[in-house]
Each structure stands twice: as C-alpha cells, then as structure tokens.
Image (cartoon, rainbow, N blue to C red):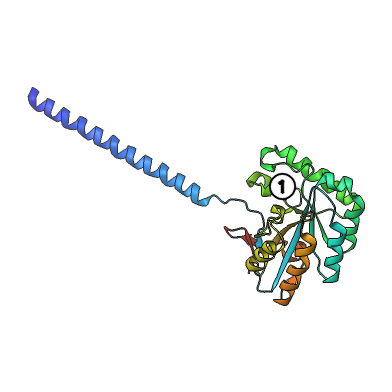
Amino acid sequence: MNRKYNKNHMIFRILIVIFLVIISIIYTGIKSNIQIAQVFSYKKELPIYSVETEEKKLAISFDAAWGDDYTLEILDILDKYNVKSTFFLVGFWVDKYPEHVKEIYNRGHDVGNHSTNHPYMTKLSDDEIEKELNITGDKIEKLIKEKPILFRPPFGDYNDRVINVCKDNGYYVIQWDVDSLDWKEMGVQPVVDRVTRNVRNGSIVLFHNNAKYVLEYLPIIIERLQREGYEIVPISQLIYKENFYMDNTGRQIKKE
C-alpha cells in the first residue's frame, strides 16, 4: 500500500512538473510573439528624402551656415536659367546677412529653417529642439513676412523625437537623396558627375551656398538637367503637403 502510494505520488509530482514546463513554454511563446509583433508594428519616423512622381521634376537646395561669398551670384545663375530653388538658413547666418535672406525670398526661392546654432538635434531636449526651430523661424518670418515650413536638420541628424517635435511646430523635415559632396572641394567635374548620374524624378539635391566651386558646377548641372528634360522646382512645390505616406527609404508617396 505504501509502495503504491509513493508511486502514485511520484507520478503526480512528475505531471505537475510537466504541466508547469508546458505553461512556461506557452507563456514564453506568447511573450515572444508580442515582442515580435511590437517590433514589426513599430514605425520609424522618416524625413522626406525624395518624392515619388511620374513628372520629370526635382529640387536643388543650398544649405547656408558659414560664409556668403557666392550667394548673390548663385541667385543670378538661377535667374539666368529660370530656376527656383530652396535655401536652408541657420540663425546666425540670418543675423549676419538679413538683406540676402530678403533677396533670396524676393527672387522667388524657398527660405527654409536650418536651426539656430547648427547643433546635432538628437542630442537636444524637446524644449531645446523647439528653441532651435522657433528662434530662427521667427527671425526669418520677421524678415520676409512668411513663416518657414521646411526644416533641414544640421548634419542630417534626426530621430523620431526630432521629427515629431518638428511636425508639432508646423515643419516638414527635409533630407536629400543626392548629396553633391561639394563641401569636399574635389573640383567641378566630380560634383557634376555625382549629381547628374544619380538624380531621378522627385530627387532632392544637396548643395552648399559657400562651396568653393559652386559658381562653376552649378550652370553645368542646371544645363545638363534641363537638357534631359527635368523641371527644377522649389522643395515646397515638389513635396506633398497632405495625403501621403513614406516608404522605408524616406521617399514620399501620394495616397491614392
């Protein structure tokens, strides 16, 4: 009797252990599936790198932070080819060259915000990000009587938080899909080749207003692009303002 009781008790304990193991496996599986679902449901915020369009059009842009040796001549070149562009201005550049801010705007170009102090935006708090946006935005608005709606993060540095703060403050965050690398000062032809070989419909090209060879490469690039049938428009006229979504490359796509 004792032996039978011990045997049954041992079987019962084994069954309890098996049951607990099964429950543990099920719980781990459910938890793992939830975590996997969370990973796959997470949507990373992206700036606009380019725009999906069947039209043969693209945008060229200039970041202005340090120096102003060529700005007026750039504007003259753009006028010559009837091209409208986008200039992203840093706050201290606006302070130093207010008349050129007005001139850019008066000649029909977008005036975008490029921060106040040119920091790495991801290293700032939400309040600091807002200050970087609003101080320069207010300065630009005071000069041209229009609030900028385009923002380019310095160094192309962004994360979800930066983009969401920008959205909350009325900005479309703009990157680029073609980097001219003009700041490397490799000469005229490397910039021409890099841009003309990599653009496509909806591209956004990055230049700098004080790049060493800008007055030489800019006419060549514009002529080449126009010869290939591209219309060069300001970023504000290239992007979709509403009813769009972003693919995983940062390409903005119009909803049907």
Give the camera-side residue of 218 and 138.
218
Instruction: Tell me where residue 145 appears, x and y as whole percent.
Output: 90, 54
Residue type (three-letter) at the residue carrying disc 1: Pro
Mark 1 — residue? 154
User: What is the quadrant of residue 14 in the picture?
Assistant: top left
Mark 1 element type: helix
Instruction: Tell me where residue 210 appears, x and y as whole percent.
Output: 79, 54
Instruction: Tell me where residue 139 appears, x and y as whole percent.
Output: 87, 47
State which quarter of the image contains the C terminus. bottom right
Q: In the picture provided, is 136 more to the left or to the right than 200?
A: right
Give the camera-side residue of 79 and 217.
217
Q: In this view, does 232 lie above or below 117?
A: below
State which quarter of the image contains the N terminus. top left
Asked if residue 203 shows in the view, the reply is no
User: What is the quadrant of residue 249 in the picture?
Assistant: bottom right
Asked if residue 193 shows in the view, the reply is yes
Classed neighbour count for the residue bearing mark 1: other residues with Cα under 10 Å, few (<14), some (14–19), many (≥20): many
Q: In this view, does 30 lie above or below 176?
A: above
Instruction: Tell me where residue 191 appears, x and y as whole percent.
Output: 69, 62
Give the camera-side residue of 26 and 209.
209
